Image: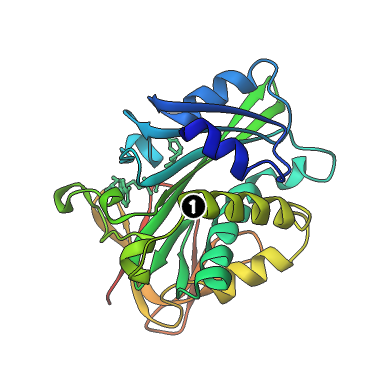
Amino acid sequence: MFRKQVLEALASSPITGCRVYESTGSTNDIALDWASGSAPDSALVIADQQTSGRGRLKRKWHTNPGSSLAFSIIIRPKVGEIENHVRFSILAVIAVTDSLLKHYHLQAEIKWPNDVLINRKKVCGILSETSWYGDQIQAIVIGIGINVASSSVPPVDFQLFPATSIEDELGKPVDRMEVLAMVVNSFFEWRKSVSKPDIFNYWQEHLAYRGEPVRIIEDGKTIASGRLSGITQTGELELTTGNDAKITVMTGDVHLRPGG
Ligand code: BT5
């Protein structure tokens, strides 16, 4: 049933190959393994349930059956994309945000670097991983987890940051497969702009907490604080500190939190 629904939803998308699981450990693990072999560019791995879904830095990602989307897109970057390979996770966060804004008119925002929030609660997380063959990129795997129905939201003690689902925010049922098709199609549309500044403009315009006080946490300690002023053209977060100095923060083991 799940397989049939997925294949129907993706029938007119640019997906070139698809592995569908009722339940698996992590779609990123399957995709990385497939990418080390014969996976074509634009292949996709999806599961109804993940038993060891992964977040960044060994954190866990919760995927309940029948209520979430958990999928990984495999990209074999072409000339012009290789030098911009780090931007593929930005394409994913934009694809999700844009779909929620345009189709459901939800106030979706991007929490740097690549979470999607609705009403300041996390609805989607992205885990991008690159596999290398020597110094050549073999593939980029972009894992996307989206909470669609209410039952996809993990228990409060599992949440690092308040979480929500599309249905909770919309107040009505949503077709999971419609969300899948929209996000996948949007991702491939945005892929055409991977080398253009448009993606940074979009990222910046939809950035959560812009102009507001934030703290940057690393290993549980505040390493920087200030007003969030934006994103640089290389994707670093820019803060303005109390004495009007600008500081930038690189993606890494850092967490953004509201508050002065
Ligand atoms: C992420 O990590 O947000 C990236 C999540 C990527 C998940 C996708 S699903 C398909 C693919 N296959 C995988 O195995 N992974 C990818 P991070 O920023 O580290 O956030 C992880 C934290 O979010 C956890 O420590 C929890 O506190 C919280 N969390 C876990 N599951 C959640 C959920 N369903 N909704 C909201 N928050 C969640």
Spot occupied by residue 242 in the image (x, y as percentages of width and height)? 37, 83
Q: Give the left or right position of residue 189, taking residue 155 as reference.
A: right
Spot occupied by residue 163 in the image (x, y as percentages of width and height)? 28, 59
Tell me which residue sits at (39%, 62%) in the image: 166
Q: Give the left or right position of residue 123, taking residue 83 as reference.
A: left
Relative vertical location of residue 46 with respect to residue 185 in this rendering, above or below = above
**In the image, farthest residue toward the right:** 79
Give, as a three-letter code, the residue at label 1. Thr
Tell me which residue sits at (46%, 70%) in the image: 108
Front residue of 134/11: it is: 11
Front residue of 119/242: it is: 119
Front residue of 91/196: it is: 91
**In the image, farthest residue toward the top:** 37
**In the image, farthest residue toward the left:** 157
Relative vertical location of residue 212 with respect to residue 125 in this rendering, above or below = below
Spot occupied by residue 112 in the image (x, y as percentages of width and height)? 46, 62
Front residue of 164/239: it is: 164
The crowding category of the residue bearing disc 1, from other C-alpha atoms within 10 Å (few below 14, some 14 to 19, many at least 20), is few
Which of the 4 image quarters holds residue 165? bottom left
Q: Quadrant of ligand 1?
A: top left
Spot occupied by residue 96 in the image (x, y as percentages of width and height)? 54, 58
> Which residue in the protein does label 1 denote?
251
Q: Secondary structure at mark 1?
A: loop
